[in-house]
Structure formats: C-alpha cells, structure tokens
Image: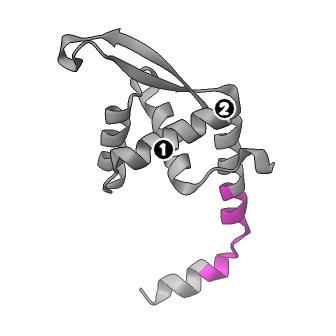
Amino acid sequence: MKDYQLGEFEEIVILTVGILNNVAYSVAIKDEIESRLKRTVSMGALHTALNRMEDKGYLKSFAGESTEERAGRPRRYFEITATGKKAIQYAKDTRDGLWAAIPETIWQSNLAGI
C-alpha cells in the first residue's frame, strides 16, 4: 500500500479539502488549516503540496468563475479523487491500527504523573 502514503502536511491538506468540499481553493484551505490547527501555513508550502498531490492523482483542480476582485483570473478549486479517498482511508486505517496496538498500561502509567 505504499502507493497511498501521505506525509503529515499532505494528510492535513487533503482532509481540509474534504472539509471545505465545493469551496476548496488555496486561501480557504490555508485559512481553514490555520483556524483548526492554530498553526501558520505558507502559501508556497500549500501550493507545493496541492500540486504534488494533484500530480499523484489524489486531487484534481478546476477553474472557477472569473471575478473583477481577482482581475479576471478564476480561482482554482480542488476536489479529492477516488485515489485520494483511498489514500486518506489508508492513512486513517494505519493510524487507527497503531493507536489500537498501544497497551492500556502505557496510558495508565504515563498519565498518572501528569
């Protein structure tokens, strides 16, 4: 299943595209990540991740309507492809399996000292 491996930031980005559904364009994605995760996202890093995931077939983009506000340039919207859905499901299943494998005693002993 190596074909479906996502890096941490890629996983965050693709999940955010899913959250935003039909309004997932770069500024909205950036704002949503920053709002939910309380972390700063550079537009350069975001565009690199979006382009990389589009190249891998996890996302596809399409142009929206042109607006005067954007000097006639259309927004570029993103949506998750079937391959992208497999990739995020694989990431979730992998993480769930790892979480489930942690013995209960680890949580009891580590949390007692907090």
Q: Earlier in the sequence, mark 2 or mark 1?
A: 1
Q: Quadrant of the C terminus?
A: bottom left
Q: Position of residue 11 (x, y in %)?
A: 55, 48
| Mark 2 neighbour density, 10 Å: few (under 14) some (14–19) many (20 or more) | some
Amino acid type, mark 1: Thr
Outermost residue toward the bottom in this view: 113
Q: Residue at x 48, y 87 (%)?
A: 112
| Mark 1 neighbour density, 10 Å: few (under 14) some (14–19) many (20 or more) | few
Give the residue number, with chain letter if any, for mark 2: 57
* Image: 22 above or below 6: above
Give yes or no for residue 97 being in the magenta stretch.
yes
Q: How many marks?
A: 2
Q: Closer to the camera: disc 2 or disc 1?
A: 1
The answer to which image quadrant residue 22 occupies is top left
User: Circle 1 sits in a helix, a strand or a loop, which is it?
Assistant: helix
Q: Residue at x 66, y 37 (%)?
A: 56
* Image: 89 above or below 9: above
The answer to which image quadrant residue 66 occupies is top left
* Image: 4 above or below 73: below
Which residue occupies the foreground of this view, 112 or 81? 81
Outermost residue toward the left in this view: 69
Q: Residue at x 59, y 54 (%)?
A: 7
Amino acid type, mark 2: Gly
| Residue 19 placement, left or right of 85 | left
Q: Position of residue 38 (x, y in %)?
A: 31, 55
C-beta proximity under 8 Å, tags 2 and 1: no
- State the extent of the magenta-drawn residues as a range: 95-106
Give the residue number, with chain letter if any, for mark 1: 48
Which residue occupies the foreground of this view, 112 or 26? 26
User: Circle 2 sits in a helix, a strand or a loop, which is it?
Assistant: loop
Give yes or no for residue 87 being in the magenta stretch.
no
